[in-house]
Image (cartoon, rainbow, N blue to C red):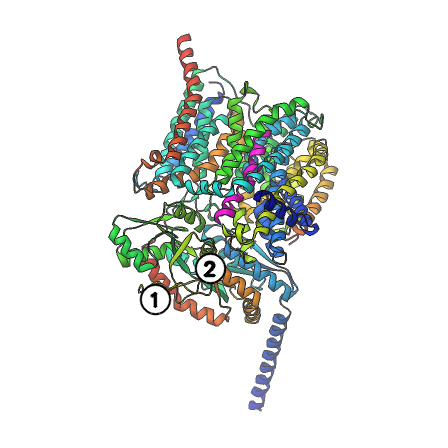
Amino acid sequence: MVLADSLALGLAAAATPINLVYCLTGALLGTLIGVLPGIGPVATIAMLLPVTFKLEPLSALIMLSGIYYGAQYGGSTTAILMKLPGEASSVVTALDGYEMARRGRAGPALAVAALGSFFAGCVATLLIAVFAVPLGDLALRFGPAEYFSLMALGLVAAVVLARGSVLKALAMVVLGLLLGLVGTDVNTGFVRYTFGIAELSDGIGFVVVAMGMFGIAEILLNLEQRQIREQATATVGRLWPTRGDLRAAWKPTLRGTLLGSVLGILPGGGAILASFAAYTLEKRLAKDPGRFGKGAIEGVAAPESANNAGAQTSFIPLLTLGIPSNPVMALMVGAMTIHGIAPGPQVMTEQPTLFWGLIASMWLGNLMLVVLNLPLVGVWVKLLSVPYRLLYPAILLFCCVGVYSLNYNAVDVVLTAVFGLFGVVLIKLGCEPAPLVLAFVLGPMMEENLRRAMTLSRGDATVFLTSPISAGLLVATALMLLLIVAPQFRRMRRDAFAE
Amino acid sequence: MTRRQDVAAGAIFVAFGIAALGVGWNYPTGSATRMGPGYFPMLLAAVLIGFGIAVALAGLRNRAIPFERMALRPAAAIMGAALAFSVLLPLAGLVPASAAVVAIGSLGYRESRPVEVLLSALLLSAFNAALFVWGLGLTINLFW
Amino acid sequence: MQIKYIRGWAMSLAAGAALLGLAAAAQAQEFPAKPVKFVVWTAPGGSIDVLSRLIAEKLSQRWKQPVVVENKPGASGILASEYVARAPADGLTLLVTINTTHINNPVLQSKLSYDPVKDFEPVSQLAIGSVTLIAPANHPANNVAEFVALAKKKGGGVNYGSWGVGSSAHLFGELLRQKTGLDLNHIAYKGEMPAITDMLGGRLDVTFAGGGTTRAQLAGGKIKVLGITGPRRISALPNVATFAEQGFPGFELAGWVAVYAPAKTSKGIVRKISADLAEVVHSQDVQSRMVENGFEPVGGTPEQFATLYRDEFPKWAELIKASGAKVE
């Protein structure tokens, strides 16, 4: 009953006309920057911070968080339509979402993404309202050893992302890990593999790699094919998902929401894993995993609901511990301190209107976003009927400006093109880029946490097994590796006998 | 020997591994308990070389799958567009750089039509200016 | 004749100089005629970034010209510093930075792509920021001395966190190790928050944190403060005694936030910017927001800042050397 009262209080605070306007503004702006490749919620929220100085604290937080989850909705749009993931969380959506679009099913893909995100947003918001405090403690249980084991599990999952040869996927994972090492080593401050280019000293940007290997590579491949035979831009097909689509998508949505909610709480990069983990899980559970990567609707529903759930639950460590779990949450801390609010557990008791108002606004914002995004599906799909010769230079231009705007760094733009070419080479050699991109994200975190764990334990490697969470994750990693490698060995033996 | 996909892929992996090993040779490796910045790279480079050799060997044993050559025209156009953007932006501003990306990028497709390209270069650079600089408030000069 | 001639020259020279001075004053008066750019090298949302945006907002109201913050992160500020050093000396491109780019980098790195003194015109020291040593709320020690005594009695090592190799947290940690002989084990993180998380999770014994973060975490009741570095107590944490007060000298240096213009920017413009910055920094609401974020507002003249820089540089260099921190 206390909960109902609190929620009513929050709803009353969030549903004032002025706050609804800020919520809508945030959600709209978030959708826009989510759709644009490159430019993300961090830069946008930072630019809007001064504007929020003049607002009521609750209005400010409502608008800023609206930008954040609005970007999650918008991010899937370009991933599905153009294979352009603007954020780590929409990389996986690009795999099957784009294939659906190519098969004339962009409409259902976008609709399922929006509906899945909405469902996940509602569930995660409820989770925050009910279990924020106990869930916050989970964030503290994860130290370097636990994160290392989680990353190890993520890397093995990366192999599952690709179709075809496991050996090549493994090699791509290792190559991705190596590329992730470029830049300054956190543990010692040592600069590695930068070839004296100062722009590389903070590493190669994720957007550079993902945009190059997915978006730019796709443009190159499309251009090549069209040199040979002119083909119409993807057929538009039906706008809405069929009953069969929905039946196929609801269970993945549910599982994705759960996975995303849990992983989103972890401040050390858990949220990045959410969408990958959800995809891998679905591929493992599917009766015919062969459909994945060829436009399976489960491959859109699961990661999209996972990343939105994760985006919501990443507020938990901030609200219950005062710990920002990602750069966007760090900006929220900035916005709160500017208004004289110290983020942390005391916010709930000292400023209940602010706390519950923010939570209620998340639900309202998600509702607005789904209402907004469903009609937009038709507009986006229309975009695909623009002749490709006009469409691709525009995509290219948006990529250039988007990448540049990340660090105001021209080197990044050229690097993106280089990764585009490299991506095409790899694809032609039968090596899919997805495992490389995931390993690229996980690699630096994995090394950082491995070495930190070893320094903390003063060289005692048993920490990875004495922590129950870490040990559990490592067992899961080993089992998963076995599941992947065993069929390969069986095949090899069969081949050997056949010869 | 025909153009075998897996052999080429394996060669690329080995090349990257050797390059990583060579460049990182002098990075301090430390010990397993207090790992230096060179520990992880050396380990990964060695594993990558191993995988590369395995991929190549498997490619030699299995049925040969040839790979397609890369088309040069699109690759050159995209690379040229990115280079032009990064050179022109600081010198000439966003509008000329945007127009250059559209114009050079369009060369990658044989059936691009000059009039259309010109129009879309104009339209897109104006739209870009409006969206990014006025709309989203990025601090980029429009013209020099 | 001769004298008259000379006097004539002198007079015209004087007139010319006065005219030039007037022109410079006029130029400074109407400054800025175009939008001004604050180049910040921390990622959006960092405390320096937020502070810059706060001040930029106030300046743009004063100047009736947009003042925009441009984030140019990377390489401990080397990219941003080099960028401003090469920018036109018209006062329209300014670097907002902390001591890292102008003290730590020159001391730690053998070759630097900019000269911290020759390439810049100091404009204003905006604020100083001290670093605190914090522990979980249930830690038995209540100050630095108790912490040191307990750690010595307990034996074994103590793990402490910092936000990076060569950061002031790391420097002070190493200094503490040398002064006390404690077995302090340095663990580097990418920011202060991940280190605090690990401390709350029981994996670190203590960690360093900025004043603003400490104030916020104190409100949450999960931490306690053992001591603060710097020359004196800070307004954000008036009850926290400095290391020196507690009998640990050598920790008196405080980090600072300052504004630099490219070298050869006209004196008039530098003076104008500096004066306006000082007024903004001393305005009521900016001051209170700075204090809440753990900064002590300064806002002095270019000369004061230049003098302070000359005084402090050798002290920092000594601290960095004493700590044994190295960047390869």
Tell me if residue B46 comes above or below residue B84 in the rendering: above
Disc 1 marks which residue?
Answer: C245
Disc 2 marks which residue?
Answer: C98
Seen as rendered, the residue at the extreme front is A1
- Secondary structure at badge 1 equals loop
Which stretch appears magenta? A300-326
The structure residue drawn at horizontal position 47% and vertical position 63%, both measured from the top left corner, is: C236
Q: Quadrant of residue C178?
A: bottom left
Residue A56 placement (x, y as % from top left): 62, 56
Mark 2 falls within which chain?
Answer: C
Q: Are marks 1 and 2 on the same chain?
A: yes
Q: What type is the residue that disc 2 sits on?
A: Ile
**Quadrant occupied by the C terminus of chain A:** top left
| Of the pair C200 and A103, the residue shown nearer to us | C200
| Of the pair A324 and A181, the residue shown nearer to us | A324
Residue A192 placement (x, y as % from top left): 40, 43
Q: Is residue A16 magenta?
A: no
Q: Is residue A301 magenta?
A: yes
Q: What type is the residue that disc 1 sits on?
A: Glu
Please tell me which of labels 1 and 2 falls first in the chain. 2
